[in-house]
Amino acid sequence: MGFKDYFKDFKCLKVDDNFILRQVIPEKDLESYFEIYSDSDVFKYYAGSDVCKDKNNLMKILNNQINEFEKARVYTWTIAETKTDKAIGRIHLSNFDCNNKIANIGYFINQSFWGKGIISASIKPVVKFGFEYLKLERIHTKVATENVGSWRALEKNGFTREGLLRHCFELKNGLYDCYMYARLYTE
């Protein structure tokens, strides 16, 4: 089976009894994502993203998540509450290196859900999916050194801090040092 075959049907994942990981539904999720995307604190350490104050642009971003899945480029899940199906965040695998079986993991969540262990709990099924379903050997990411909550969530999920990369993370307010984190299939 070729790598693109893994993207034929979107796979929803269960986080726990309170949260699921599902594909974005742009029209349904627009307001929830607008709340997230309009919060500058959410994107303080998220490279390549900025606050979005235009719902039309945000709708394009949400539709692009589906397009990127269909092109087998990015596997993006919406983190949603089980009871209400309200979108509260996003987690994805991207930058696939099919020859070496490597992918990057990234995530963000509505600020009102910070510090509740939801990102940490969401990383677990995504990593399992990446290793068992996509047959990856390595999942990695770069995290700004100041983003303590993010690197703690990775460490809780068995990721190893592999080193410090100086001035490698450009954000709106400057260059940041970051930690490289990775987890191997064998760990």
Image (cartoon, helix red, strand yellow):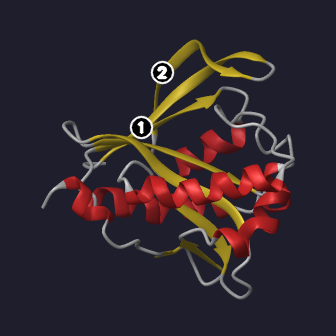
Task: Name the residue at 49% across, 36% down.
Answer: 141
Quadrant for the N terminus in the image = bottom left
Relative to 132, is 126 on the left or the right?
right
Q: Give the mark nearest the N terminus, 1 or 2.
A: 2
In the displayed structure, 63 sits above or below 175; it is: below
Q: Quadrant of residue 63?
A: bottom right
Disc 1 is placed on an element classified as strand
- Name the residue nearer the viewer: 23 or 21: 23
Disc 2 is placed on an element classified as strand
**Percent of width and height locating residue 54:** 84, 49
The span from disc 1 to disc 2 (Cα, nearest Å) is 10 Å
Residue bearing the label numbered 1 = 182
Please say if the residues under marks 1 and 2 sit with CB atoms less than 8 Å apart: no
Relative to 142, is 79 on the left or the right?
right
Q: In which quarter of the image is residue 2?
A: bottom left
**Percent of width and height locating residue 121:** 58, 64
Q: What amino acid is labelled 1 in the image?
A: Ala
How many residues crowd around disc 1 within 10 Å: few (fewer than 14), some, or many (20 or more)? many
Q: Residue furthest top?
A: 166
Task: Name the residue at 69% across, 81% down.
Answer: 85
Residue 5 visible in the snapshot: yes
Task: Name the residue at 81% across, 41% down.
Answer: 51
Q: In which quarter of the image is residue 125?
A: bottom left
Residue bearing the label numbered 2 = 163
**Percent of width and height locating residue 99:** 18, 37
How many residues crowd around disc 2 within 10 Å: few (fewer than 14), some, or many (20 or more)? few
